[in-house]
Image: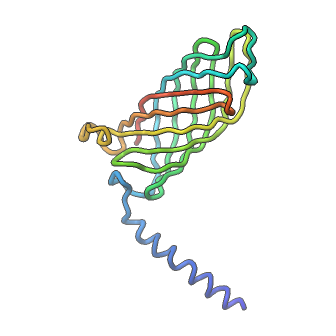
């Protein structure tokens, strides 16, 4: 019985070995290696507006909101035409928001020459001011990154260079947080 199980396991793993051999020469849509590690940093700006019924409440009869400037750092792991990654952020708020910071995972597809389309999920801490408290909860989002070649500016940077990012996130489905900025991939 053990020999049969070993033979079955060997037969099942043979296609995986063949794929792994092909992967060493595979490339992503932008011509970079299909497998590896891609670290990045970036700066984003945007707005965060909470619902009146959120856990932040409405102590002044309004809703918690404010402008944001965010620094992000993360790493993507390309897996052929898709990728997975992790990202952290530290965000200075204005208006009713003092600071936000968090960590999230990302998964998505590589698109075009240097673009990405992704969904994200993680945990976010929000420090309020002006009678708003501090809370933390889950954060979910979607986003897109485009590089110079994708928007007709090929030759300005390399494939792993500067990309523009647009994203929209929500804090436990109680807010909207649109952000835009520049990401530098290495």
Q: Quadrant of the N terminus?
A: bottom right
Q: Does 186 sit above or below residue 34?
A: above
Q: Quadrant of the C terminus?
A: top left
Residue 36, given in percent of the width and then of the height, sits at 45, 55
Q: Does 62 sit above or below residue 7?
A: above
> Is residue 70 toward the left or the right of residue 5 in the image?
left
Residue 71, given in percent of the width and then of the height, sits at 51, 28
Residue extending furthest left? 155
> Is residue 33 toward the left or the right of residue 124 in the image?
left
Q: Does 130 sit above or below residue 164?
A: above
Residue 177, given in percent of the width and then of the height, sits at 57, 27
Q: Which residue is found at the position 40% from the left and 66% from the top?
A: 24
Residue 176, given in percent of the width and then of the height, sits at 60, 27
**115 or 176, nearer to the observer:** 176
**171 or 127, nearer to the observer:** 171
Where residue 134 sits, quadrant-wise, is: top right
Please tell me how many numbered marks the rendered image carries. 0
Q: Which residue is found at the position 36% from the left and 36% from the top?
A: 162
Give the colouring mode of the picture: rainbow
Where residue 106 sits, quadrant-wise, is: top right
């Amino acid at each position: 019985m053990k020999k049969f199980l070993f033979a079955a396991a060997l037969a099942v793993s043979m296609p995986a070995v063949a794929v792994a051999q092909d992967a060493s020469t595979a490339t992503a849509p932008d011509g970079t290696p299909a497998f590896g590690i891609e670290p990045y940093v970036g700066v984003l700006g945007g707005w965060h507006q909470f619902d009146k019924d959120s856990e932040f409440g409405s102590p002044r009869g309004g809703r918690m909101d404010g402008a944001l400037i965010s620094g992000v750092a993360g790493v993507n792991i390309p897996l052929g035409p898709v990728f997975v990654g992790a990202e952290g952020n530290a965000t200075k708020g204005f208006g009713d928001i003092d600071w936000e910071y968090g960590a999230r995972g990302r998964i998505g597809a590589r698109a075009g020459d240097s673009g990405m389309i992704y969904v994200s999920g993680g945990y976010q801490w929000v420090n309020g001011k002006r009678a708003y408290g501090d809370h933390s909860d889950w954060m979910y989002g979607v986003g897109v990154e485009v590089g110079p070649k994708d928007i007709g500016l090929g030759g300005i940077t390399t494939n792993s260079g500067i990309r523009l990012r647009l994203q929209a996130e929500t804090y436990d489905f109680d807010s909207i947080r649109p952000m835009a900025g520049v990401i530098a991939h290495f």
